Image (cartoon, rainbow, N blue to C red):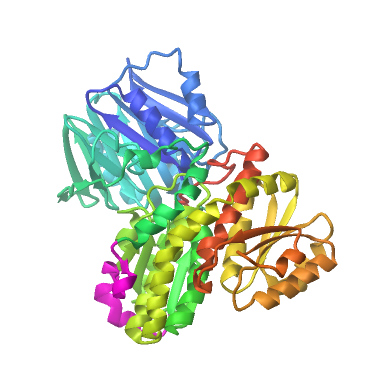
């Protein structure tokens, strides 16, 4: 939530910052702003998207080799020009950009108001910069020292960058709980919430740790922790390709990412799987495999689509490893005093690796002695770094707010984990293990085939684009797919949709069915196929409009459903990787036809770093 960018060096800061903000817009897009040193410390900000800010500045002289920028997802204070970042300090000598939430802002604000500070906005972030200014002036210390002292008073999460009117070659940044990356160029530095604004200028990055303060001054970088101890910067090489964060000819990132899935699943399997040799390796699990084999239970945590991937994993893990699995929303888990024993295995799934609830749930489980695995997409993210071990999904940057390729990559990694554990534990026969490896290897090609349904699904979307409700039903492995299909539609088209286990329909949703109601059945050929057929008949008896995702060659459902989508068949445990594809495409096309902003749906953000 909220994206931050900073630049100091020899180039013009404005174009770098605007471009960076556009890359970070997936994090929030209700308002945007920048601060530059162009004949004073000037802040320009505007409600709306980054392009609106850019348009409003087309006539303005913006020359500056230092600057900061922000794209906002509102928490405190409605989205408007005043609440947009950057925020000035009281005397307008300092400006701040902030990603996160200051929990104790109101008590700090009261104290500052008593001291005579006048606030412009309703944001918590403005309090941070007033506090820094207050300390800076009273103690007459270095700015980084004032920030350090302020950090000791702040409760909450933040990544901040502060600019000083009197220091044209200085940016100071700090983080606790919100991501912050520094790009190290030749005589120039970049700061950002993730590496996407940095990648075209340098591959050398430093991922800043919690409670660290970065000072960039006179072309030098230094890092201190909150106790003022010097830290050694660890420069890493970025492995991201520039083209992976561009649309590559697609109309939207979401469509590009849907179509990338054959490749992203392949990337996820690469080096880990060799079916002909019966090899399955997950480097991250190596040191912990014996503990996992002997664990009494596995708890899977996540939010949104990642939680759905966890539900698929529950079925797969229990089927193959015979270890009891519980899947929980991270946001519920963290606040309900859960029972966690030493030796429990907790798997945290997160595309961004920054979701605040998932991170907090992880810390809770860790503090109680659980072994924590991460399944993250973003390399070096907070969750990835806080785990004991894990496996990256290697799906490449996912920019569309609605998650697509991350979901299939998560399910792929979790399947690999389950099979590896089952193999080591002896709960899967050698023949079945081999067979599953072959089945997995064949998935990218089958996903590719499912993508060929795009035109057919586009036509279907035209039929249903004006519907106001949708029901998605599936059983077994396809039940989480029903949830995911409904979530995708809600997120980007704003049509109300519910996912349900097909058999539960008769306990409520059946009352909604009439001749207007589209019901999407995920009814591929698996062990619950016959039961799902009965559920389809129940819907047809009530005149519901049935869209059925079935296995290629299906003849029985064809006679009952109004619309049929035939997808390639795989082992039933792997079907979610295929059956989800038409649902992603359906939601995409419906949203486009309804004129919705597919990549940046209203009110949502890709990375939810607030609880
Ligand atoms: C947000 C995104 C979803 C995502 C969820 C969890 O709600 O819009 O697409 O599934 O967060 O994010 P994570 O990065 O933890 O997977």
Q: Is residue 332 visible?
A: no
Q: Nearer the viewer, residue 101 or 236?
A: 236
Q: Quadrant of residue 291 in the image?
A: bottom left
Q: Nearer the viewer, residue 58 or 475?
A: 475
Q: Nearer the viewer, residue 514 or 585?
A: 585
Residue 159 x %, y % = 36, 45
Above or below 580: residue 61: above
Residue drawn at x 35%, y 81% as measured from the top left: 423
Q: Is residue 113 visible?
A: yes
Magenta stretch contains residue 295: yes
Residue drawn at x 45%, y 85% as measured from the top left: 322
Residue 431 x %, y % = 39, 83
Total numbered circles? 0
Magenta stretch contains residue 424: no
Q: Is residue 369 left or right of residue 415?
A: left
Q: Nearer the viewer, residue 198 or 228?
A: 198
Residue drawn at x 41%, y 43% as measured from the top left: 99
Residue 384 x %, y % = 33, 59
Q: Is residue 125 left or right of residue 515?
A: left
Instruction: Give the magenta range.
Output: 271-297
Q: Quadrant of residue 532 in the image?
A: bottom right
Residue 224 x %, y % = 20, 47
Q: Is residue 120 left or right of residue 382?
A: right
Above or below 137: residue 571: below
């Amino acid at each position: 939530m909220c994206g931050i960018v900073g630049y100091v060096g020899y180039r013009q800061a404005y174009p770098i910052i605007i471009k960076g903000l556009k890359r970070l817009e997936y994090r929030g897009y209700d308002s945007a702003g920048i601060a530059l040193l162009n004949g004073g410390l000037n802040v320009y900000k505007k409600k709306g998207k980054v392009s609106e800010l850019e348009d409003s500045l087309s006539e303005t002289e913006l020359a500056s080799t230092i600057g900061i920028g922000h794209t906002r997802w509102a928490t405190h204070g409605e989205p408007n020009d005043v609440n947009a970042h950057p925020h000035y300090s009281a005397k307008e000598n300092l400006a701040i950009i902030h990603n996160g939430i200051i929990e104790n802002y109101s008590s700090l604000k009261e104290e500052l108001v008593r001291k005579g500070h006048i606030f412009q906005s309703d944001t918590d972030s403005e309090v941070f910069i007033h506090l820094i200014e207050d300390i800076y002036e009273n103690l007459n210390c270095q700015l980084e020292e004032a920030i350090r002292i302020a950090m000791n008073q702040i409760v909450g999460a933040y990544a901040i960058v502060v600019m000083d009117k009197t220091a044209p070659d200085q940016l100071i940044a700090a983080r606790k709980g919100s991501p912050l990356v520094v790009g190290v160029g030749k005589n120039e530095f970049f700061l950002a919430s993730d590496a996407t604004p940095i990648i075209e200028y340098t591959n050398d990055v430093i991922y800043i740790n919690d409670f660290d303060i970065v000072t960039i001054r006179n072309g030098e970088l230094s890092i201190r922790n909150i106790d003022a101890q010097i830290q050694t910067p660890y420069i890493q090489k970025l492995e991201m390709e520039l083209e992976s964060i561009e649309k590559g000819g697609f109309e939207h990132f979401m469509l590009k990412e849907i179509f990338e899935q054959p490749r992203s699943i392949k990337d996820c399997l690469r080096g880990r799987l060799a079916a002909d040799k019966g090899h399955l390796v997950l480097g991250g699990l190596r040191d912990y495999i014996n503990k996992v084999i002997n664990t009494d239970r596995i708890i899977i945590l996540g939010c949104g689509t990642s939680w759905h991937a966890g539900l698929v994993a529950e079925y797969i893990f229990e089927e193959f490893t015979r270890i009891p699995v519980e899947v929980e929303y991270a946001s519920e888990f963290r606040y309900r005093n859960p029972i966690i024993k030493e030796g429990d295995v907790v798997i945290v799934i997160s595309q961004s690796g920054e979701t605040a609830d998932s991170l907090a749930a992880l810390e809770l489980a860790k503090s109680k002695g659980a072994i924590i695995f991460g399944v993250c997409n973003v390399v070096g993210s907070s969750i990835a770094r806080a785990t004991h071990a894990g496996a990256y999904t290697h799906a490449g940057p996912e920019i569309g707010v609605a998650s697509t390729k991350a979901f299939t990559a998560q399910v792929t990694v979790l399947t690999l984990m389950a099979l590896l554990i089952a193999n080591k534990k002896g709960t899967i026969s050698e023949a079945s293990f081999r067979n599953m490896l072959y089945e997995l290897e064949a998935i990218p090609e089958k996903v590719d085939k499912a993508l060929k349904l795009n035109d057919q699904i586009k036509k279907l979307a035209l039929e249903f684009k004006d519907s106001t409700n949708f029901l998605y039903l599936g059983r077994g492995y396809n039940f989480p797919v029903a949830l995911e299909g409904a979530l995708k539609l809600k997120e980007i088209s704003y049509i109300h949709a519910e996912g349900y286990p097909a058999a539960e329909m008769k306990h409520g949703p059946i009352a909604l069915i009439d001749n207007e109601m589209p019901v999407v059945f995920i009814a591929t050929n698996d062990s619950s196929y016959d039961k799902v057929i009965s559920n389809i008949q129940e819907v047809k008896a009530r005149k519901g409009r049935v869209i059925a995702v079935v296995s290629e060659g299906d003849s029985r459902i064809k006679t009952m459903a109004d619309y049929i989508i035939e997808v390639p068949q795989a082992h039933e445990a792997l079907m979610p990787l295929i059956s989800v594809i038409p649902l992603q495409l359906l939601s995409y096309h419906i949203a486009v036809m309804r004129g919705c902003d597919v990549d940046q749906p209203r009110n949502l953000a890709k990375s939810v770093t607030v609880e």
